[in-house]
Each structure stands twice: as C-alpha cells, then as structure tokens.
Image (cartoon, helix red, strand yellow):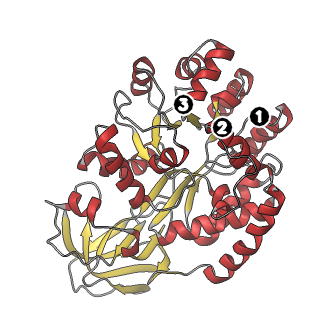
C-alpha cells in the first residue's frame, strides 16, 4: 500500500529547495515519489500521514558500519590495557569477533538496524567479521536488517590474521553471498592480508561485478607493516595489485597517507569513507581530505548509528585538521547516495524518506539550510521513517519488530558474549 504525506514541507536533498506539497510514496526498492498540490484528494489504497509543520527529506545512509560490535557498549575492559592501535585490535575487537556465534551476530544486526532506523538511516553499508562463525554470517545479517526494514550492502571482512583456512572461509562466504545478493568483497586491512588473498578478493570482485571494502592506513602501523614486509607503502601495494580500479571500492579511513598516495587515491575511481569519532576514540589521528578527491562519504565505524552526529563530528574536528566547510560537510553526508546510485545498487531510491519534527527557533530555508544542518538538526527530530516506500518508524516507534523484546534479548546475550571473551 502506498503512503500519502499531507501538508509536507519537502526539502530536496540535492538542491535544498523547500516546497510545500503533498507526496505520494510508492512501495518497492526501485520506486519513487510523486508530488501533488496541497489539499489534493488522497488516492485510493493510500495510508495518509499528516505532516503539517514537519519537514520531509531523503532518509540517511551509513557508508561504513560494523554491526558486529553492537554488544560492546559497556563491556568490561580487557585484562591488559592496550597501549597502541594494534593492541586495541588484538585485545578488544579481535577478541570480540572471535567469540561471535550466529545468535550473537543476529542480535547485533537487529539492534544496529533498529538504532539506525530510529536515527533516520534506511541504508547501511556494513563490514562484518566473525572468524569462528563465518558460514552464513552475511545471510544472518541481511535477514535481520530486512526484518527491521533497513536496506544494506554487506561484506565479510576477510583476513589472514587467524590463519589461511579461515581466510579462505571468508572468501567462500563472500562468493556464496554474492551469488544471491548485492554486496562487496571485504578485506580487513592490508597489514592482515597477503598478496595471495588480495588477488583472490580482486578476482571475486571482478567476477561478481563488485568492489572491495577495506580499511586503509587507519593507523601508522599499517604503513610500517607494509614497508617492513613488502617494502611498499599501502597505496603503492594496492595500486600494483590493481585494487584501486573499481568505482565500487570503498577505502576506510585513509588517515596516514603521503602526498603521492593521496594523489593516487584522488585520481582513482574509488571512494573514501571518513569515520571521525572512531578515529578520535582510537587516537589514531585526524582525517584530512587534501588530495583525496571528491568521492568522500561518512560512516560510523561501529561507534553508533547516527549519521547526523557523524556529520557534525566531521565538521567540528575538521575545523582544525581538514579543509571542510558547511557545504562540503553536507556533501560528504549525502555522498553515500551518489555512491549507491552511480554503482547501480538498489534500496536507496527516492522513496526512502524521513519526516522531521523540527521546530527551529530561527527561520529555516534554502538560504540558511547548512546552519541548521550543523547546529540544529538532530536524530531526536526524526518522527517517521519510510524505507523503500514502507513505513518502518512511526512516531519514533519501530513498526516491524518489537524493540522491547529485542533489547531485552540483547542485554541477556551481551553477558554471554562478555563471558566468552573472558
């Protein structure tokens, strides 16, 4: 059944033009929307929603998430406090992902999708790892996201860090998933990926018309390891392996790159995803867009599921470390839609909408939109969310799943995970 938004103040996400209109929203992952004059007769078989005093615009999307980390919030500290980034991975995140099973993967995906939806996010690009529960993990996440109503572009984070047998399983899981679904070919980071695994991943991406999704120079350790083991910097190695060819490829972080590497990335067709708050949390450095080109989007890297918050973080931190301004902050926030559309991925059509109950204390228009975007709009203003033409959040409540039941289960299973982690 279609949805009819009455008396809406529509904000075109591309032009930022404001218009008062009624909106017909059709259901389907390739459908769009139609505009009607205010007060038009509601078409038959439509669910009306009164949007008087509300703003309607395109829903949000996350360019880089880690649903597998959802149960980390509040967990006990590791027995050995990490002293650097590699130890953060070793003692926290690699310990967590090794202890995931299918049940824990599912509940992590459900809670991530729920939080995303309530924050206005209707599409997630996720990067998953569960080295001792590889088989079927992507299908488990996909079904959980679908259950909530959030679209997705998934990958399995293949890595050699747990041995070549598990690395091979990661590639097999990728192939199995790509046979039935849109997705990417995930790799952890080049310091845990051999040339052999790189080549296999690139071959799979070519066969299934996909791209890579990989962490790049998040910390200086990535560069040091590649120089020591391969006598090449990260981007030089990736370029020689022909890992920068596809416009579907996503490079996460890209903090510790020299000028030549930045130019190589900027000259390529690949996309860079910025994860400001994760970088702050891990104390790995600050994102700087110089030389990286225009293909920059935003992600949360598993820190949270609030893209408005990520945009603000990118802007404020960038005042000291980047060449970001109001328009470029918004462009990075919305670039994920361009990435998805230009690469032919489905699930992010115009019928993904968010209704904002935003009551600004000053005038709000096309002329001062950026000021409200950075200093005013927050996830708390999200009232309704429409994903692929279906209403999945109404009056801030999830419609397709029981949030209360899932959260109760998540609290129970988080204790199971923490105990498994020791």
Query: What label does residue 217 carry, if any?
Result: 3
Pointer 1: what residue?
Answer: 161
SS label for mark 2:
strand
Q: Residue furthest top?
A: 231
User: Which mark sits nearer the N-terminus, 1 or 3?
Assistant: 1
Pointer 2: what residue?
Answer: 188
Residue 50 in percent (x, y) is at 32, 86
Residue 112 image-quadrant placement: bottom right
**Residue at point 36% right, 52% down?**
334
User: Which mark sits nearer the N-terminus, 3 or 2?
Assistant: 2
What is the spatial separation of the Cα atoms under label 1 and label 2, in whole angstroms? 9 Å
* Of the pair 298 and 13, the residue shown nearer to us: 298
Quadrant of the frame with the C terminus: bottom right
Query: What label does residue 364 carry, if any?
Result: none
Residue 221 in percent (x, y) is at 60, 28
**Residue at point 66% right, 76% down?**
407
């Amino acid at each position: 059944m279609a949805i009819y938004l009455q008396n809406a103040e529509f904000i075109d996400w591309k032009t930022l033009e404001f218009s008062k209109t009624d909106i017909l929203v059709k259901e389907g992952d390739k459908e769009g929307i139609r505009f009607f004059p205010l007060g038009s007769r509601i078409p038959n078989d439509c669910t009306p929603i009164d949007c008087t005093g509300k703003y309607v615009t395109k829903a949000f999307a996350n360019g880089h998430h880690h649903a597998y980390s959802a149960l980390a919030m509040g967990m006990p500290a590791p027995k050995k406090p990490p002293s650097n980034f590699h130890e953060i991975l070793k003692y926290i995140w690699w310990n967590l992902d090794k202890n995931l099973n299918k049940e824990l993967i599912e509940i992590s995906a459900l809670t991530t999708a729920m939080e995303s939806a309530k924050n206005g996010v209707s599409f997630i690009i996720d990067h998953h790892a569960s080295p001792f529960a590889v088989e079927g993990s992507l299908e488990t996440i996909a079904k959980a996201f679908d259950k909530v109503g959030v679209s997705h572009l998934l990958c399995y984070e293949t890595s050699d860090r747990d041995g070549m047998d598990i690395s091979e399983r990661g590639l097999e899981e990728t192939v199995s998933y790509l046979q039935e679904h849109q997705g990417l070919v995930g790799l952890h980071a080049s310091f845990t990926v051999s040339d052999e695994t790189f080549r296999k991943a690139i071959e799979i991406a070519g066969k299934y018309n996909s791209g890579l999704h990989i962490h790049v120079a998040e910390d200086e350790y990535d560069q040091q390891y590649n120089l020591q083991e391969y006598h090449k910097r990260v981007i030089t190695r990736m370029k020689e392996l022909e890992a920068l060819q596809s416009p579907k490829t996503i490079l996460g972080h890209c903090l510790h790159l020299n000028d030549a590497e930045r130019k190589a990335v900027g000259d390529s067709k690949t996309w860079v995803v910025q994860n400001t708050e994760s970088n702050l949390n891990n104390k790995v450095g600050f994102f700087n867009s110089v030389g990286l080109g225009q293909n920059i989007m935003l992600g949360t890297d598993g820190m949270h599921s609030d893209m408005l918050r990520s945009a603000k973080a990118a802007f404020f931190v960038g005042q000291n470390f980047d060449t970001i301004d109001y328009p470029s902050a918004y462009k990075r926030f919305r670039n994920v839609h361009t990435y998805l559309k230009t690469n032919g991925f489905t699930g992010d059509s115009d019928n993904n909408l968010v209704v904002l109950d935003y009551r600004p204390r000053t005038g709000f228009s096309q002329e001062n939109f950026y000021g409200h975007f950075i200093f005013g709009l927050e996830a708390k203003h999200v009232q309704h969310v429409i994903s692929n033409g279906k209403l999945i959040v109404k009056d801030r409540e999830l419609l397709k799943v029981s949030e209360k039941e899932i959260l109760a289960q998540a609290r129970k299973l988080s204790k199971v995970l923490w105990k498994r982690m020791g």
